């Protein structure tokens, strides 16, 4: 929590220093801003020192945020340190664990209190990959605002007291909605090792499991035009990622089942007014659809995540090792981008 708190303070201070409108130039994609932020010692909360926070390409990300009608003040308000500090003071560690948690890959995740943004730690090589394609990503989202590739809204790092550098990225939450997400799927289009289900878990247990390709046993039935637009957009996004050698990404899907929600919640809930919505976010941030197995109604949320893996010698070697072990070479997730 102390690491994430320092990062949030660094982000807020850098944005507060930005002018209301910064013109972009070629140098904007290489610019960094450094400042000192307070850092509490977790073993002795009464003491604190400062560490170096570095913000990357602040003007570029300001322009991306404005493309999606996110102004600086609203962004700062969402990334408030108050939830972390408040829960610490109250000793509410259970609630704190829902805000700051550890991902399966060991990455640190922070969900803003309003559910709009996710801050995630990334590996140094992922950080370098993103910086290398940032200008291309910027150009792509400007010409494809309805892209399913997750919206990246900030990038930074911190030099910790132990000398280690942590890299962070700020993203829009694919599941930004007032609706309860009852099922989650992480789909890669592969089959080897792509099962998460064990036995027959209860509906409640299923809501906490991120399911995989082999667990998906139905199709999504969408209106014809929406289906066509969705397929075209996924193909366009996949081609863009392949162009820059990016692979091993996932199609993240969330499902909300209206029939599983108490009637009192349905009556009270109203869809909030968004300043801008993608064509794939028209109903509470998602799309209405039916499931093929029983025509059950649901709301589907879709996004492409984990897009920083480059198909390099390391990944080529990984693919060779897996194929030589006897698994289906067409079923592994480590595939050449093209």
Image (cartoon, rainbow, N blue to C red):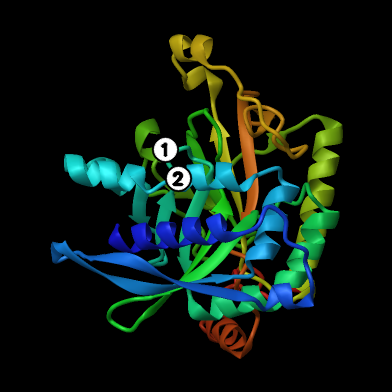
Name the residue: 57% across, 41% down. 74
Q: Quadrant of residue 98?
A: top left
Depth check: give the residue in front, 140 or 320: 140
Q: Secondary structure at mark 1?
A: loop
> x and y percent of residue 23 in the render?
77, 63
Question: Residue placed at 85% from the left, 56% from the top?
Answer: 143
**Of the residues under marks 2 and 1, which one precedes in the sequence?**
2
Please tell me in which quadrant of the rendered image residue 279 appears: top right
- Residue 207: assigned label: 1
Residue 112 image label: 2
Report the side of 282 relative to 10 (left or right): right
Residue 38 drawn above or below residue 258: below
Q: Nearer the viewer, mark 2 or mark 1?
A: 2
SS under mark 2: loop
Foreground of the two, 114 or 76: 76
Query: Can residue 336 be seen in this snapshot?
Result: no
């Amino acid at each position: 929590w102390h690491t994430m708190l320092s990062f949030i303070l660094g982000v807020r201070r850098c944005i507060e220093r930005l002018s209301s409108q910064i013109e972009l130039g070629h140098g904007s994609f290489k610019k960094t801003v450094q400042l000192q932020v307070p850092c509490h010692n977790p073993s002795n909360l009464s003491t604190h020192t400062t560490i170096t926070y570095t913000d990357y390409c602040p003007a570029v990300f300001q322009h991306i945020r404005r493309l999606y009608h996110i102004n600086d003040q609203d962004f700062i308000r969402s990334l408030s340190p108050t939830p972390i500090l408040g829960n610490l003071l109250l000793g509410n560690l259970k609630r704190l664990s829902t805000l700051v948690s550890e991902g399966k890959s060991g990455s640190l995740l922070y969900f803003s209190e309003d559910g709009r943004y996710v801050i995630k730690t990334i590996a140094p090589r992922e950080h370098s990959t993103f910086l290398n394609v940032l200008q291309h990503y910027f150009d792509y989202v400007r010409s494809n605002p309805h892209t399913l590739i997750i919206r990246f809204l900030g990038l930074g790092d911190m030099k910790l007291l132990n000398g280690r550098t942590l890299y962070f990225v700020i993203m829009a939450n694919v599941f930004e909605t007032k609706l309860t997400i009852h099922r989650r799927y992480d789909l890669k289009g592969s089959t080897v090792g792509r099962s998460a289900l064990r036995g027959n878990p209860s509906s409640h247990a299923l809501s906490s499991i991120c399911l995989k390709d082999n667990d998906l046993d139905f199709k999504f039935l969408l209106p014809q035009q929406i289906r066509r637009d969705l397929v075209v957009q996924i193909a366009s996004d996949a081609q863009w990622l392949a162009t820059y050698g990016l692979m091993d990404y996932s199609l993240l899907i969330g499902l909300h089942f209206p029939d599983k929600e108490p009637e009192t919640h349905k009556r009270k809930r109203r869809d909030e007014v968004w300043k801008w919505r993608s064509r794939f976010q028209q109903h509470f941030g998602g799309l209405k659809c039916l499931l093929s197995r029983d025509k059950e109604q649901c709301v589907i949320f879709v996004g492409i995540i984990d897009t920083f893996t480059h198909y390099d010698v390391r990944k080529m070697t990984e693919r060779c090792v897996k194929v030589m072990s006897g698994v289906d070479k067409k079923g592994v997730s480590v595939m050449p981008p093209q």
